[in-house]
Amino acid sequence: MAEKEKSAQIKQRNLSKIIRPIFGALVAAYVLWRLYTVFIVEAKYGPQVWVSLLVSGLIIGAVYSLIAIGYTLVYGILLMINFAHGELMMVGTYAGYFVFEAAQAIKMPNATDPELVFANAYPVLTIFLAFIVGMGVAAAVGYFLEKIAYRPLRGAPRLIPLISAIGASYVLQNISLLLFSPQLRNYDNPEALSRGDGWKLIVNDLPVNIPYTGVFTLVLSVILMLILLYIVKNTRLGKSMRAVAMDKDTAALMGINVNQTISNTFIISGLLAGAAGVMWGLHNAQVYNTVGFIPGIKAFTAAVFGGIGNIGGAMIGGMVIGMIESIGPTALGISYQLKDVIAFAILISVLIFKPSGILGEVLAEEKV
Amino acid sequence: MKNQQTRDILKKGLVFAIIIIFIMAIGFHEIAAALISRIFSVDVKRGSIPEVRFMMYFMGLFAFLTGWANSDKREGAFLKKSTHGLLVSVVAGIFVVLFDLILVFLVNNEIDIREYLTAFSLDSMNFFLFNKGQLGLLYHFAYFVIFGFSGSTLNVLLSSESAQNLKEKTGKLYNATKEKINSAMPPFLKKYGKYFFLLLLAAAAIILPRTWGSYVNFVVGLVGLYVIAGVGLNIIVGLSGQLVLGYAAFFAMGAYSVALLNAAEPHNIMLGFWPSVLIAILMAIVAGLLLGLPLMGLRGDYLAIVTLGFGEIIRILLKSDLLTGFTGGPRGIHDIQGPTLFGQPFNSDVEYVYIIFACIALTIFIYNRLQNSRTGRAWLSIKEDAIAAQATGVNLQKYKLLALCIGAAFAGLVGGISAARNQFTGPNDHSLLVSMNVLSLVIVGGVNSIPGIILGAFTLKGLPEILREVENYRQLAFGILLIVMMIIRPNGLWPSSRPLYEKYNCPEDGEKNVGKERKND
Amino acid sequence: MKKKVLFSLVVLFALVLASCAPAAAPAEEAAPAEEEAMEEEVMEEEAGVDPRCEGEWGCAVVPAGETIKIGMSSPMTGGYADFGIDAENSGLIAVEDFGDVEGFEFELVAEDDEGGAEGGAAVANKLTSDPTFVGMAGPLFSGATSAGIPIYEEAGIAMLSPSATAAALTEMGSSVFNRVPFTDPIQGAGAADYMFNELGFTTIAVLHDGEDYGKGLATIVKDEFEALGGTVTTFEGITAGEADYSPILTTIAADAPEALYFGGYSAEGAVLANQMKATGLEDALFFGCDGTWGADFLENAGDNAEGSIHANTRKPPASDALAAFDAAYEAAYGVAPVVLSPFSYNSYDCATRLMEVVAEVAFVGDDGSLYVPLADVVAGVRGTTDWTGISGTYTCNEIGECNSEGPAFETVVDGEWVVLE
């Protein structure tokens, strides 16, 4: 009996050895054919379209990167997917929304402009405050999330914290639904950073709009990511994070407070998600209770794509996913409705062909 | 020591205050009062506010629970133990009063913040303050003191030694009585009691649907379908330990198979219900194979996200312009023909319930046989320790795939029956929410436990119909349940005798270990 | 064994509990309409069956002391909750205004169908099992309607919808379904005509949100516009609920259409309007539908809403009844009518008309209960001729279309809606 099983297993392995390359070849052939069709045969879109799409892709990629880093940090240290991470972003978006609403409501009439409000009088301060509040609230929620829903489950088999995370995601989504009503809200940007306006880049005699909010998002994301890299590489906090991720027990023996470190990880991932949320609000305007869900899934795709646990991988993964989402449907000539399908297809492909991601995994050897 | 205790009391008081403030902020206090009002047979019309005395009952109950949950059960003087709970209640009361000050300020100045926080309507805020305005603060504080003290004292009393003795005695008495009844029963009844009981159940299953009205049939049918789905998902998640989050994709395969083969609109192939259901099951199995073959080697959490993606892909594809010619697009498929039996239409609500009951019986039968078979044991070994299982010659891939396909088959069945019963199916019927609902009911009800799944299905689909006041809070409640269940009772409300996770308590700095770590996947 | 006993008892208990639920109709009398009709006949044969209660659907029976139920089915939770809340508001005012029938009061039962088919079927099943239920002033959304029609048809409940506009609904051959708004084909043809003839556009792009209503409308506009001789440069679907449509707008801009027609709801419409400027479509006109019309669009699109055109129901002629309704609505709910949704007046009229027909055909039986012959209600609603409500005058034709007028087109000037002639 055992021999039959063994030969069946061998057959299975051989089968999957054959299936994978065939599958890969089919996908590659399809993609190449579509690209050829769109670019060479139809050649419908001028370069200004592609540049414009590229810009959109970079911007959305930056947001995905920030969220992906949060996923990757938590996974690297706890080997669990924080399903509720997208909701941290949503919390940040709402918090920022309220700051802007307040700033737009405080009237400060002066000689030249009787309608002046705080947001337009001190735009930099307002935006700064919005980010601080957004990031702070998201970090706080992340901290309590870990404390209430994940800490009691340390050491449990993987399935259990994952289900708890799903529950937490539900809870956060519904609390904000119940508190703030299903009404769709829009960010009221200060005039200095109003949506839609931007620099005009001339490509091929045609203008391409580079939105101010988009550039702001991109620049701020890069800054935050650089700060994070610095923290992880050079500060004590970062060292403890890496140590706990590598080997929890030894780290404890070395005097590192494991619980504190894990809490700090959640706080940092919350800070980043909150910032992503406020940026989302500034650039995309929309605030509603499930705003974090789909970006969360896509960010997780990005994290896996780049190699889970690997911060650089998450950054690159986010950018790549964002650009593929933006350029993909047009480049492949398929319907725009299918762009989420592209993202998931990438996820599945990566997991089939290179489960450790593009830049390789950085995982704890033993689950914390 | 003193400092630590003070901080502890302050913290706990703050926590409970935040809970009740939260309840008010999401508008749940009105709903809770309405529920209490229902218990007292005073119905509340939808949209109107219940009587104030029920709000008082609710507040009193909450204060009581605050005291109860915080009494100090360690060794010590009786009074000292119950004052711990009292102190926490007092602190909570103070924080609540502070919040009330805000409410009073808003009410008196007629400030309307409903644009930002929807629950803060004038009526709602007044209701929270017992319609007594500023006096409400005094009431709240008094309630917390009085009821908190009562709750705390009662808890201490019940856990005292004399109470424990009483409990033991009652337990012994209960067991003794059970023994007596057991031995007094004639052996005939003992042997055939089971069959007699099953006969009774079957009779009820046939007679009851004819008597309790089409609405109840509708709900019972819905619950029944979710039971079958739950068992199917349980085979995947519970028996073989793979978390699948895109279960709705298999529903879609089943539903669309039956729909496309039985409706005039897209293709007009009137194949008939029964053959279509078989095809539906087949299609679901094929989908399971397609999903499973490439992805069997994945880690648990990856599998979860990928199956979620798969579910979404199916839904997007069904809705897309690309496939509209084939699937009917966002409009879905209408006017699906129902089943016929010997030429006569068999599609009234009663008849559907019979079909569903029959399927449930079949499902339970298959499930039991599977669980106790070689396959079931293989799954158990994979779940417990995959590497060891492989070492003993269990073909991981084959068994995992088998679990996925069997689970998918059940989903296909449910999808098909569901489409015919609703006479309609569409892409939005098979969304992520449906997958999550089925997962929740399996987890909350009890993994690997048929009674648990039935309980879970009833709680998910049946209760909201009965407790219609809570429909807005249903998802929130389920989310909270998921978290709480995982922490205190990961094997579900009605655990099976072979639990999913061995639970033991090894208090380390007060932390509970919920389960041993397993090097799975 | 013990566990099995226990669990079966629990199941039985639960089922019994479910059957005793106060939310459901009086359990003892709840029975499908056909069986009820037979029971009625059997019961009354002893007392002499009233010929009006014979027939497939029989009569609804309202015992003394109970209320006659008029139903509504609309999304009351989720992103489209405003529609349902508004419908319920209007319906409640209608019930209050109408008064009673032979001493029996009406009661409005507004149920949440989440705007979709599954919800629509669930609500239909729930309401039709209540023997005091006589008419449905709805459903509001086309998806819920199409799933509900077979169920209401079987139970013989007359339907009069204020807003379900999909073309297919009246092509299903139903004798119970009627509606008062203009249909999607009429709106689509009107929009295409307006763009081609009035505005003189020859190239447009058409987007839809991938849902039943939006896609249906967009398809009609595309077909009509092309039939008139125009060119549709792009026909694409977006995914509802997203925040960034600039990629697809950029690709559309490459063809420089003169207008962008969008079939869908105001949330997505506002996002599109906001992003048109930045993606090269500044000169294109945003042409929406009655789903994009509303305060939501104005608020979310802000300045970018200027100049856009949307469809809306024609403004009803001023009347005392209209003024009275406006006042009552505002007093009761703190917000003016036709703000939460454009169908406030329609909902009021549908409820009122249903109640009128019921009042005409109902009679009190010997046992003091009110009998409402359902077939007569159905016929009465379908036979509505030159009936004037606060939203307009209606005559229902043989398939249930009660409104032959088309929509009015409105544009946004200085943040206000202005009707275009």
Image: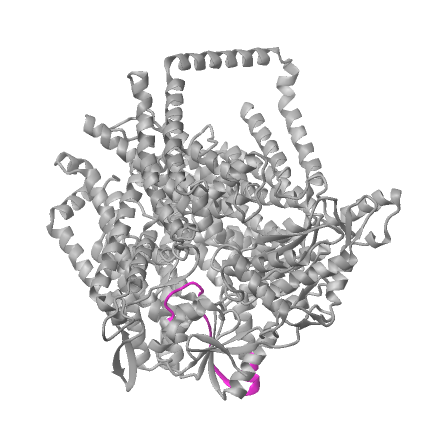
Q: Give the percent coordinates (x, y) of residue C412.
A: 45, 77
Compared with A68, A171 (above or below) is above
Reply yes or no: does residue A194 show up in magenta: no
Q: Give the percent coordinates (x, y) of residue C227.
A: 57, 84
Quadrant of the image occupied by residue C153:
bottom right
Q: Nearer the viewer, residue A157 or C121?
A: C121
Tell me if A183 is positioned left or right of A314 in this view.
right
Q: How many marks?
A: 0
User: In this rendering, does residue A57 appear at all?
Assistant: yes
Compared with C281, B66 (above or below) is above
User: In this rendering, does residue C115 appear at all?
Assistant: no
Q: Quadrant of the N terminus of chain C?
A: top right
Q: Nearer the viewer, residue B132 or B25?
A: B132
Tell me if B94 is positioned left or right of A182 in this view.
left
Q: Which residues are magenta?
A: C223-245
Q: Nearer the viewer, residue A323 or C222?
A: C222
